[in-house]
Image: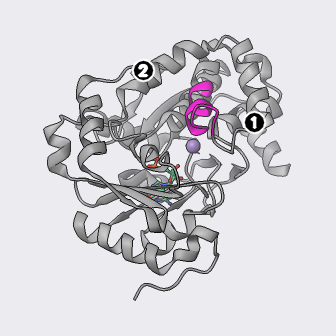
Amino acid sequence: MQELESFRKQISTPKKIVITTHHKPDADALGSSLGMANYLKKKGHEVTVITPSDYPSFIAWMKGNEEVLNFEDEKHKEDATKKIEHAEIIMCLDFSALSRTQDMEPLIRNSSAYKVNIDHHQDPEDFADFTYLSTAAAATCELVYDLIVKVGDKFLLDSDIAECLYSGIMTDTGGFRHPNTTKNVHLVTADLIDLGADNSKISRLIYDTNSVDKLKFLGFALSRRLVILPELQTAYFTISKKDLKKYNSQTGDTEGLVNYALSLDGIKIAALFTERKDAIKISFRSTEDVSVNKFAAKFFQGGGHKNASGGKSDLSLEETAEKFEKLIKENKKLLFNQLELVDEK
Ligand code: 5GP
Ligand code: MN
């Protein structure tokens, strides 16, 4: 409560504010950042949204998108660095370990600005002056809505802010299907629609604007890159750099792929291993009765939510898949939600 008061005081007079989120932002990361930015601008602040990398074109339409600075873009880097150095408030949205901002981490860590962390991930790093965190929230966008209401500024919400926030709630609940789709999610969503969020338009922009390359890549991945281990109730994809190049893969084109593995009847654990620039990026998904976040943290330098986690591996793509299969075999009890994982041999 005391922290909330200090936050309210901080934003009660015009400030220079930087809002940032995690590397390769998704709709919740970008939607919460731009939703918050549009709200703070209405309160008279000078606000800059800086993303640690680029993001998919299917989310690049929200209000304020044109002014977002991409820290990995050489054209933006200098300006973005200055903005962070001069910021009086830095807001970190949809992540709670500063390492997820990659190259921006030292700048944020060394800044003396008042820091705010709004997030719904587990095991947060304690770096902020004001932390607004709930693992019960489906999306950071839901928390941004709650916070604006708590501060007493509900009257400032408008259709632009509502569309940003709706996007993150829609995608982080898997289109209102995952177990995190609570009563509060529906209540908040109803209000966002009431405020002018065009739910059918947003769903079309995010889910139904595939490129031909992306669909062909999906067909290829499903027919050639899916490994199913029925006895372990596990299925996974391995995607190489070459595969990505062949299908002219764009940022965001692999998003959602892992869910096809989880959608198989009888499968409880799904993974996607993608060969990126300097490491293998991993996505884990599980059914409600299985947790994958501790598995991701213990064996793959990651973490996340109970049923949606991620991590990375410095081995080759083939070695990573082998390691994964071995660990799943050794931790078969993971399927029964065992808490203690067996050490890697
Ligand atoms: P995705 O598979 O969509 O990239 O990530 C799913 C979830 O896993 C994210 O919402 C985030 O909670 C978590 N996650 C993904 N990558 C990492 C990572 O490298 N480190 C940690 N700690 N969590 C991650
Ligand atoms: Mn999120």
Q: Residue at x 78, y 24 (%)?
A: 153
Say whether residue 229 is left or right of residue 135: left
Q: Which amino acid type is shown beneath numbered disc 1?
A: Leu
Q: CA separation, marks 1 and 2?
A: 31 Å
Q: Which residue is mark 1?
A: 147
- The range drawn in magenta is 165-177
Q: Earlier in the sequence, mark 1 or mark 2?
A: 1
Reply yes or no: does residue 169 show up in magenta.
yes
Q: Secondary structure at mark 1?
A: helix
Quadrant of the rendered image containing residue 185:
top right
Q: Quadrant of ligand 2?
A: top right
Residue 296 in magenta stretch:
no
Q: Nearer the viewer, residue 155 or 304?
A: 304
Eyeballing the image, is 287 above or below 171? below
Q: In terms of image quadrants, where is residue 208? A: top left
Residue farthest toward the bottom in the current orientation of the protein? 345
| Residue located 14% across and 48% down the image | 242
Q: Amino acid at mark 2?
A: Asp
Between marks 1 and 2 in the image, the one whose residue lies nearer the viewer: 2
Q: Is residue 311 visible?
A: yes
Q: Residue at x 59, y 19 (%)?
A: 163
Q: What quarter of the picture does the C terminus occupy?
A: bottom left
Q: How many marks?
A: 2
Label 2 CA crowd tier, 10 Å (few <14, some 14–19, many 20+): few
| Disc assigned to residue 208 | 2
Q: Is residue 316 visible?
A: no
As helix, strand or loop, the secondary structure at mark 2 comes to loop
Distance from mark 2 CB to nearest ligand 1 atom below 8 Å:
no
Is disc 1 in contact with disc 2, using a CB cutoff of under 8 Å? Answer: no
Compared across the picture, whether 293 is left or right of 310 comes to right
